[in-house]
């Protein structure tokens, strides 16, 4: 139906160029939105720049085929394609800490220490481990663990922390509790646990540089039993020491008596016969008699 103005003249409807461009642009936005919606649902990623922090490397994943592609991205800014996903892999040294009193993420604390089952009791061990991801093995690690490796914290929780607990359990489990509580015992356990971890994870691309046992705790009953046992062992050692000291004292007394006897023999050998006779005569007691008894004796 035509539009008539006040003067009775028909108004012709015209579409301006601006209106046409607005319509085309709106249609383009709708089509782009639909494309991105289905692309993202299929696993695609929006193209654009991506940044790799210093000390890390980037691993490019072809999300369409699910394969690792290209070389590792060094630190810096790079271009990420539409059907690509860049995983940032930390290559600097990282720390695993398993201890009592760790935060649970909700303002509380949890006991995440290693529980070691020994022959006599259960020990709670606080331990830290330091490790590095080898860049040359990053692609192999992603192929083996997929999205677990994409989130390094999830990878640690799911794989590395259980491995550390197992290594510490193996290192201390067969060790005497009294020895495990000593510095040499802890050092031996650290060395054995480190060896176990590197034998398992070294070929996969995870290198553990050190394991530190920060503390070992016992349950109260076992601690009391150990304290009593250690006290008895100390008493035995003290008795052994006293016996050994007495043996030394006896040996000293025997040596002194032997030396004195040798000196006396040497002194006696040096005495002349006249000196001996003089000494013997000096020991004879003199007897005094009245003169009349002496005279009477002469008369007889």
Image (cartoon, helix red, strand yellow):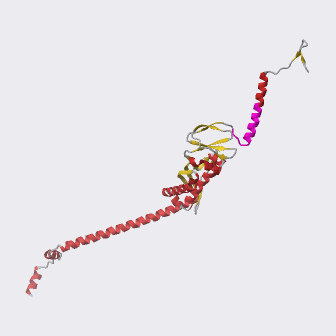
Q: Quadrant of the C terminus?
A: bottom left
Please state the extent of the stretch shown in magenta in the rendering. Answer: 28-45
Q: Quadrant of the N terminus?
A: top right
The answer to whether residue 171 is seen in the rendering is yes
Between 69 and 267, which is closer to the camera in this rendering? 69
Between 194 and 258, which is closer to the camera in this rendering? 194
Image check: 230 left or right of 121? left
* Res 21 → quadrant: top right
Image spot of residue 188 (x, y percent): 50, 57
* Res 79 → quadrant: top right
Relative height, residue 103 to residue 7 (above, below): below
Image spot of residue 294 (x, y percent): 10, 82
Image check: 234 left or right of 285? right
Which residue is drawn at the image coordinates 57% and 51% (left, top)? Answer: 206
Image spot of residue 224 (x, y percent): 55, 59
Image spot of residue 112 (x, y percent): 61, 51
Between 256 and 289, which is closer to the camera in this rendering? 256
Magenta-highlighted stretch: main secondary structure?
helix
The answer to whether residue 95 is seen in the rendering is no
Which residue is drawn at the image coordinates 75% and 37% (left, top)? Answer: 35
The total number of labels drawn is 0
Relative height, residue 183 to residue 287 (above, below): above
């Amino acid at each position: 139906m035509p539009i008539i103005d006040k003067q009775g003249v028909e108004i012709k409807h015209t579409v301006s160029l601006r209106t046409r461009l607005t319509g085309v642009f709106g249609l383009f936005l709708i089509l782009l939105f639909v494309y991105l919606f289905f692309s993202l649902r299929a696993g695609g990623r929006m193209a654009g720049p991506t940044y790799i922090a210093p000390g890390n490397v980037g691993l490019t994943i072809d999300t369409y085929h699910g394969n690792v592609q290209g070389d590792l991205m060094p630190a810096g800014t790079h271009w990420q394609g539409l059907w690509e996903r860049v995983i940032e892999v930390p290559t600097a040294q990282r720390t695993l800490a398993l201890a009592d009193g760790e935060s649970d993420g909700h303002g509380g604390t949890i006991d995440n220490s290693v529980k070691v089952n020994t022959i006599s009791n259960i020990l709670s061990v606080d331990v830290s481990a330091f490790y590095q991801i080898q860049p040359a093995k990053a692609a192999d690690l992603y192929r083996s663990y997929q999205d677990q490796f994409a989130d390094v914290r999830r990878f640690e929780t799911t794989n590395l922390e259980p491995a550390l607990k197992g290594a510490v359990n193996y290192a201390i489990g067969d060790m005497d509790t009294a020895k495990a509580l000593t510095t040499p015992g802890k050092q031996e356990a650290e060395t054995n646990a480190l060896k176990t971890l590197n034998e398992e994870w070294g070929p996969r691309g995870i290198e553990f540089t050190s394991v530190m046992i920060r503390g070992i705790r016992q349950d109260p009953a076992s601690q009391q039993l150990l304290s009593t046992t250690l006290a008895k062992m100390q008493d035995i050692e003290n008795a052994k020491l006293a016996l050994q000291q007495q043996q030394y004292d006896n040996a000293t007394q025997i040596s002194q008596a032997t030396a004195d006897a040798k000196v006396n023999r040497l002194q006696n050998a040096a005495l002349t016969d006249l000196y001996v006779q003089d000494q013997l005569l000096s020991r004879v007691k003199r007897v005094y008699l009245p003169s009349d008894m002496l005279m009477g004796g002469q008369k007889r």
